[in-house]
Amino acid sequence: MKVRFETPDTGEEQAAADAQAAADARAVVSELGLLDLHLDSVIEHVTAYRDVIAKAEAGIARCLAEAAEIADARARLARPESVSRSDARARERQLVATEIATATRQSERTVTTCITDSETLITRFPTTLAALDAGQITVQHARHLINHATTIPVEAQAAFEEQLLAVAVETTPYRFDDTARRLRETAHPESITTRTQSAVEKRTVFIEPTCDGMATLTAHLPAIHAIAIDDLIDKIARASRTNPYGHLGRPGLPDPTTTTSTGTTTGTGTSSTDPTISTDHRTHLQRRADAFTDLLLGPGNPAHPATITASVIITAPATTITGNPDHPNTPPGLLHGYGPIDPHTTRTTAATAPTHLRVTTHPTTGEPTLTRHRKPPTPTNLTPTHPKHPTATPQPAETDTTPTTPAPTGRERYSAPNDLRLLLATLDETCRFPHCTRRANRCELDHTHDWAKGGTTTPNNLHHLCTKHHHLKHQTNWTITTHPNHPRHLTWTSPHGRTHTTKPPNPPPT
C-alpha cells in the first residue's frame, strides 16, 4: 500500500487568513461607525430634552409668580378689618404654597422658596428668564445668579446680571456658582474690607445630626483660615497613605493591631514582610475625615500635624502689599482656591510669608519670569496699620535676582522647577479640562505640546490636569490645541468632534 502525503500551500492559506482578518477589521470599523452615529443621536436627544426642561422651568417660574399675584389679590379682597394687609398677604401666600406643595408632592418650605425666587426672576432679572426659556442656561444657573445678584445694591444688579449671563452660558452650574461669587466680590460697590469686617463677626461652628450615628460639623470661617485648614487636612491624609494605623481609636473601625486584610491574627497588624505595603484600605475622603478628627482630638498616627505645614497661596498686586489698605481703590488679593480677599488680610499674610515670588511678563512673548525673595520679613519689624486688622508692611527681603523660569529654549529639563509650578498653579487655579474644578495644586503638570515631540518646559506650554483628565488626554482620542495669540487658551476636541475652550481664570500680570 502506498501512502501519499501532500504538503498544503501555506501561501494560499496565509492569503486567505489575511483576507479574513481584513474583512473582520472592516466589519469592526463599520460597527464602530454605526455606534458613533448612534451615540451622536443620543447626545443630540439629551441636549434637546435639556432645552425642553429649561423651557419648562421658565414656565413654572412664570406660573409660581402668577400664583403669588393671585394670593396678593385674594388678600386685598378678603382682608377683614381686624387683620393687617401684611398679615393677610402672608396668610394667603401660605395657603397658595400649601395648595401647590400638596399638588406637586413637595414640601411647603421648598415651594415658598421657589415662589420667592420666581418673583425675583420675573420682576428683576427678565434677561435671565429669557435665557432659561431659550435653553441657554439651566434652572440651577438661574438660582445661583439670583442668590448672588440680590446681595448687591439694586442699582448695580443689571450690569452684574449681564456680566454673569456671559459666564453662565459657558460653564456648569457648580463652576458658575464659584465664578459668580468671585465676580460679586469685585462688582460689589461697598469695600471688600468693610464687608469682611462685618462678615467675620458671623463666624461660627455648628453641628447637624444625621442618621446611623453620624453628624455633620460645619465651620463658617474666614476664607484664609478655611483654606489653610483644608490644605493641612489634605496633606495629613496623603501622608497617611503609607501608614495603616492612622485611624487608631476611631469608633467603629477595625483595630489594625489584631486583624489583617486576610483575617490572620498577628501582633503587628500585617502579614507581609515588606514594610512599604500598607493594609490601610481607607479612601482619601475617609483619611481626610480621620485627619480632621486627629487635629481636634489629638494625633492618632505618626503623621502629626506638627511635622506638616499648610500651604496658602495669595496673588496680589504690589500696590496692595505696599500701598494703603484703607484706600477704597486698593485691589484685593486673590486667595488660591477661593478668590478675592480683603487687602488687610492680604498684607497680614504677606508680612509673615516665608516665600515671595515677583512675577513680570515679557512684553512681546508674554512669558512670565519669576524672581524669588528668599528671606522672610522679621515679625519684630512689622508695624500694625489697622486696629481691627493688625496688618503690617513687609520689610525689604534678601532677593535672588536670577529668574527661576527655565532658559528660553525650554529643552534643558523635562520637569518644571518648583517656582514655575507655583506660578502656574496660581494662573490655572483648577484642572484645565472643561468644567473640572480639581484645584491646580492637587493636579499634575502636563506639556500641551508633548515633550517627546519637541515640546518645551515653558509656562506657555504647561497646564494643570487632574490624574483622570491627564490619562484621558494621552490614552483616548480627545485632542488639544492652543490659540495662536493666547497659547494658554486650550481648545479640547472630543472624539465626536465637539469643541470646548478653557481659559486660565487668572491671566499673568503685565
Image (tube, rainbow, N blue to C red):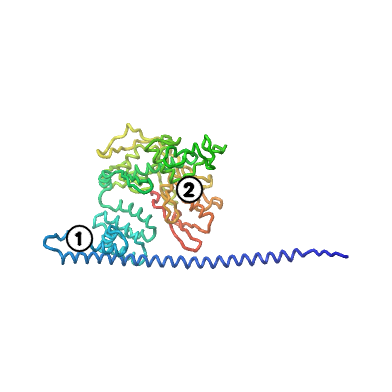
- Number of the label disc, if any, that sits on residue 444: 2
**Which label sits in the foreground, 1 or 2?**
1
What amino acid is found at the position of numbered circle 1 in the picture?
A: Arg
- Report the front residue among 219 and 306: 219
Q: Which residue is mark 1?
A: 91
Q: How many marks?
A: 2
- Estimate the x, y position of residue 452 in percent, counting from the top left: 56, 51
Report the quarter where the N terminus lies.
bottom right
Whole-number angstrom distance, CA of label 1 to CA of label 2: 57 Å
Based on the displayed image, in which of its 4 quarters is residue 74 positioned?
Answer: bottom left
Of mark 1 and mark 2, the one earlier in the sequence is: 1
For label 2, the crowd category at 10 Å Cα-Cα, with few meaning under 14, some 14 to 19 and many 20 or more, is some
Q: Residue at x 46, y 58 (%)?
A: 491
Label 1 sits on a secondary structure element that is helix
What amino acid is found at the position of numbered circle 2 in the picture?
A: Glu
For label 1, the crowd category at 10 Å Cα-Cα, with few meaning under 14, some 14 to 19 and many 20 or more, is some
Residue 276 left/right relative to 395: right
* Residue 61 appears anywhere in the view: yes
Based on the displayed image, in which of its 4 quarters is residue 398 positioned?
Answer: top left
- Estimate the x, y position of residue 337 in percent, counting from the top left: 38, 47
Q: Residue at x 31, y 38 (%)?
A: 393
- Estimate the x, y position of residue 399 in percent, counting from the top left: 41, 37
Q: Is residue 5 above or below residue 358?
A: below
